[in-house]
Amino acid sequence: MRTRFPALLAASAMTALVAACGGEAELSAADEPLRVGASPVPHAEILRYIDENLAEDAGLDLEIVEFTDYVQPNVALDDGSLDANYFQTIPYLEEQEASAGYDFEALDPVHIEPLGIYSSTLTDLADLPDGATAAIPNDPTNAARALRLLEANGLITLADTGDAAPTSLDIEGNPKNLEISEVEAAQVPRSLADVDIAVINGNYAIEADLVPAEDALALEEGAGNPNANLLVVRTGDEGDERIQELEGLLHSDEVRQFIEENYEGAVLAAF
């Protein structure tokens, strides 16, 4: 990780020197690397593709910082350690803004990672036994998505919560008497050996060498899915020319082709 303060001091000294010499050039944010936090798969992989193939021609100096959880990327964006992050959906962002008071701006959707139901013992949800155990992510947004996926496959019914995200407390019908446990999202794949079924985020499924299109017993629908992943910045920074360059590259034909060729339907372009 680069040390920020020496760089800032050096930039200030150079600016002062240019001014003293009567020069017209000035350093700006565009001269600094763009630090972007991302989940390892597929977000950091997509960013690395951009860094290695597209960024130089666009004049973009990209610095990628990987995170293995869903909390720290927003903490780091808020405290200025990052210029942007790329790992989350709008529903998750809205929940985080409400709970932590962040003032962030979401840019345009880039890709969708459908949640899936997986099992190490079953090949068909119809064979799920009475009293089966199920693991789902524990953050409010992904827990709600997981519960809706279970409902869509006839495993539970949920109360009408209006615009509010459902929780396990909103389960009204449970014909299989599922025992649902909530686990930190990154750890859900590791729980597969201990439960009958697990609802796993697409990126963590890929990291666990699962192929959603082949291994999932059920997947979220992609059409009309509000849970696209996107670039997020601090409010007011969306006009930063480095952000604009990266946003354009994330929505390029080259990135669409990279997604289509590398993720076998586990990641879908949302643009």
Image (cartoon, rainbow, N blue to C red):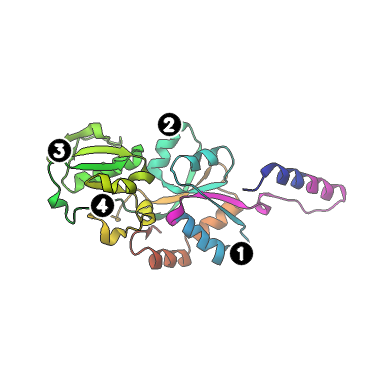
Q: Whole-Å distance between the Cαs marked 3 and 2?
A: 32 Å
Looking at the image, is mark 1 or mark 2 earlier in the sequence?
1
Q: Which residue is mark 4?
A: 118
Q: Which residue is mark 3?
A: 177
**Residue segment shown in magenta:** 13-42
Badge 4 crowding class, 10 Å Cα cut-off, few under 14, some 14 to 19, many 20 or more, is many
Q: Whole-Å distance between the Cαs marked 1 and 2?
A: 38 Å
Q: Which residue is mark 2?
A: 99
Looking at the image, is mark 3 or mark 2 earlier in the sequence?
2
Q: How many marks?
A: 4
Q: Position of residue 96 (x, y in %)?
A: 43, 36
Q: Is residue 87 magenta?
A: no
Compared with 238, 250 (above or below) is below
- Mark 1 vs 2: CB contact within 8 A: no
**Residue that appears at 41% across and 38% down:** 94
Q: Amino acid at mark 3?
A: Asn
Looking at the image, is mark 4 or mark 1 earlier in the sequence?
1
Q: Nearer the viewer, mark 3 or mark 2?
A: 3
Is residue 10 toward the left or the right of residue 73 in the image?
A: right
Q: Position of residue 67 (x, y in %)?
A: 48, 47
Looking at the rendering, which quadrant does residue 212 occupy?
bottom left
**Residue that appears at 47% across and 60% down:** 251
Looking at the image, is mark 3 or mark 4 earlier in the sequence?
4
Q: Whole-Å distance between the Cαs marked 4 and 2?
A: 30 Å
Is residue 236 toward the left or the right of residue 182 in the image?
A: right
Q: Which residue is mark 1?
A: 56
Q: Amino acid at mark 4?
A: Tyr
Looking at the image, is mark 4 or mark 2 earlier in the sequence?
2
Secondary element at tag 2:
helix
Q: Quadrant of the C terminus?
A: bottom left
